[in-house]
Image: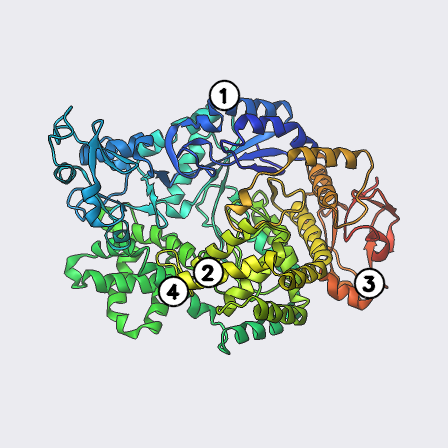
Amino acid sequence: MRTPVSTYRLQIRPGFTLQDAAGTVPYLKSLGVDWIYLSPILTAEKGSDHGYDVTDPSAIDPDRGGAEGLLAASQAAREAGMGVLVDIVPNHVGVATPVQNPWWWSLLKEGQQSRYAPAFDVDWDFGGGRVRIPVLGSDSDVDALEIKDGELRYYDHRFPLAEGTYTAGDPTADDPREVHDRQHYELIGWRRADDELNYRRFFAVNSLAGIRVELPEVFDEAHSEIVRWFREGLVDGLRIDHPDGLADPEGYLRRLREVSGGSYLLIEKILEPGEVLPAGFDCEGTTGYDALADVDRLFVDPAGQEALDALDTELRGGQPADYEEMIRGTKRRITDGILHSEMLRLARLVPPGTGLGVEPAADALAEIIAAFPVYRSYLPEGAEVLREACALAVRRRPELADAVGLLLPLLLDAGPEAGAELGRRFQQTSGMVMAKGVEDTAFFRYTRLGTLTEVGADPTEFSIAPEEFHHRMARRQAELPLSMTTLSTHDTKRSEDTRARISVLAELAGEWKAALARLQEVAPLPDGPLANLLWQSIAGAWPADRDRLQYYAQKAAREAGNSTDWLDPDEAFEKQLSAAVDAVFDNPQVRAELETLVELLTPYGAVNSLGAKLVQLTMPGVPDVYQGTEFWDRSLTDPDNRRPFDYAARRAALAALDAGDLPASYTDDAAKLLVTSRALRLRRDRPELFTGYRPVAATGSAAGHLVGFDRGSAAGAGALTLATRLPRGLEQLGGWRDTAVDLAVDMADELTGSTFRAGTVPLSAILRDYPVALLVPTS
């Protein structure tokens, strides 16, 4: 199996095709990248910028470059000695525009007789033999239906007509409402989706319909094009999107490993603190959110927790945030709201003989899911997780004891037998609730420090000491050496540099409290926790244009769901929210307050950014660089983090670095490019320097402000990473002063070219020009 040393994620879209990706290969090669890493490339919904709404898995999207585009990208990579990793989406397909998806079109036209009927996860009995499609403004909108060109039309929506259900060639011969009643689908009001939908979706996205890749014939057809990539040597590995949504992730990975010829596989799996991948998962690891959480917390000052907790309590009217109770509430908000259809489907699978009605069963199942500490239990391995969740559900709701007692043995049975459907579907559902209730709701409510509310993280873990970080890295080296590490992705709530700047607030809690109070006085928001989140995010991302910040503010407020929400926006609140953002641009007092804060945070944030980047690129695992983040990137949640960027500027800056034009300041764009390129090149060109992991401790009064590790083996020194942490505190100490590290051999800094003799070397000498150093033995 060929494995990557590093990867570089490219977002392939109509505006940046596979041919464009091929054109970037020489630059990426020079940067030090080992593999290119492509976002989904199969045919997707027209105009989709992300590609996760695949409409035809049998072909590469022509708008993304088509088959010839992948060939060009692959050939360019091969000629550069690089590999190719591709993101695939096995859980669902895009159905927003039925005519674009031949599987879905066939299902709607032919119903249960369609050859694709088994591919979709439809509860036909609940729908009276019809698939419910929630596209109408209201049920009365059936009056707006018309027949045109042999199709049923609802404004711009097009649907097929089953044979024999209308008078062909005469659109006036039939009442469209009556024709609609004869179809294998039922168009319903969009608000009914929460309770009455009868097909499995991706989370609560009605336009993404789940498919059943656990069926061999469905797997084969959905993966035929992907198998071709490996058969023709175009691709070297796969990133699997959302495996928690699959009926049998373990079986899926086993089959995928077989058809890909034993190739490198990564899964987009969120691991909660202390959770490990199931032993039966045949893959190299995750896409790196677990690593991201560890790196972030290494650069957060634990001394700031008490003050930030106190500020958060004050903003909540004196009531401290109870995160456990908060996520119980946000999960129940999801199970009783946008995913209630899924809970009702589970409830309908409870055997009638139990005497448990559908709504009581749904209530008990929702309470169990709300008690889950992880995204999913993988039975039988995760049986204890399920039992503990059931016990917690009963402690919270004693009146559910009998119902939970009836459900537990049913939920523990998740085998392939027909009677085990409830157990299987429950596992598919728990991750959906976790993602929507925690990532997409609680993370916008629990706002004491925005760095901590990132995908894959536990925001109650405020920081970690270097000693704990070293422990986790040693375990990663031993157990998951080929798992990906990352700092930014297309899904992160904030990019790495935005979070690194926000992390400084833990060292400046007093200054932050005062600044926030002044901002609230001039541009007030009645929702204190949201104001905390908003101004942290604006300060972290600044400078930013008005439209970007307005979009983020609205999305954050609606996701939080406290003062407004997506289904029923509060116009008065959102007007006030919009005014607060506008004040950044229109009110000199607000602008001055923000810029004063950003000026204070920026140098410390840059230290955090460079430290996090070097640590991530050199720690155990396969480091990924998200597109463009070799320069400073201060993005917010999607789609802000998928904006185009300037490759030409990066090429020119890299050429200047290679010509010896080093950045004058560590706050320059080129400083991050220097760290990124030198670390990537060293990992690729000197793999023998990255075979182990040993902590490197400093001595002296500022020792706690250093994180250091040696990637060499027990036999000798390897690449030595040194990074500054908690820079404001270091400054207040008067700098490194007497702090030093012991070098076992003569070493040189890959960033500056400076050399250091073996022995005790002052950190003030090693970190004279930049807050980080990457040392290698000189012989």
Residue at the image point whose x is 18% and y is 38% from the top:
184
Sequence order check: which comes first, mark 4 or mark 2?
A: 4
Q: Nearer the viewer, mark 3 or mark 4?
A: 3
Q: CA distance from mark 4 to mark 2?
A: 36 Å
Q: Nearer the viewer, mark 4 or mark 1?
A: 1
Amino acid residing under circle 2: Lys
Q: Which residue is mark 3?
A: 735
Is 97 left, or right, of 13 in this rendering? left
Q: Which residue is mark 4?
A: 371
Q: Which residue is mark 1?
A: 68
Sequence order check: which comes first, mark 3 or mark 4?
A: 4
Please rate how many residues cluster around mark 2, counting C-alpha atoms within 10 Å: few if below 14, some from 14 to 19, many from 20.
Answer: few
Q: State the image quarter where residue 533 is shown.
A: bottom right
Say which element carries label 2: helix
| Residue 372 point in image, percent of width and height | 39, 61
Q: State the image quarter where residue 37 is shown.
A: top right
Sequence order check: which comes first, mark 1 or mark 2?
A: 1
Please rate how many residues cluster around mark 1, counting C-alpha atoms within 10 Å: few if below 14, some from 14 to 19, many from 20.
Answer: few
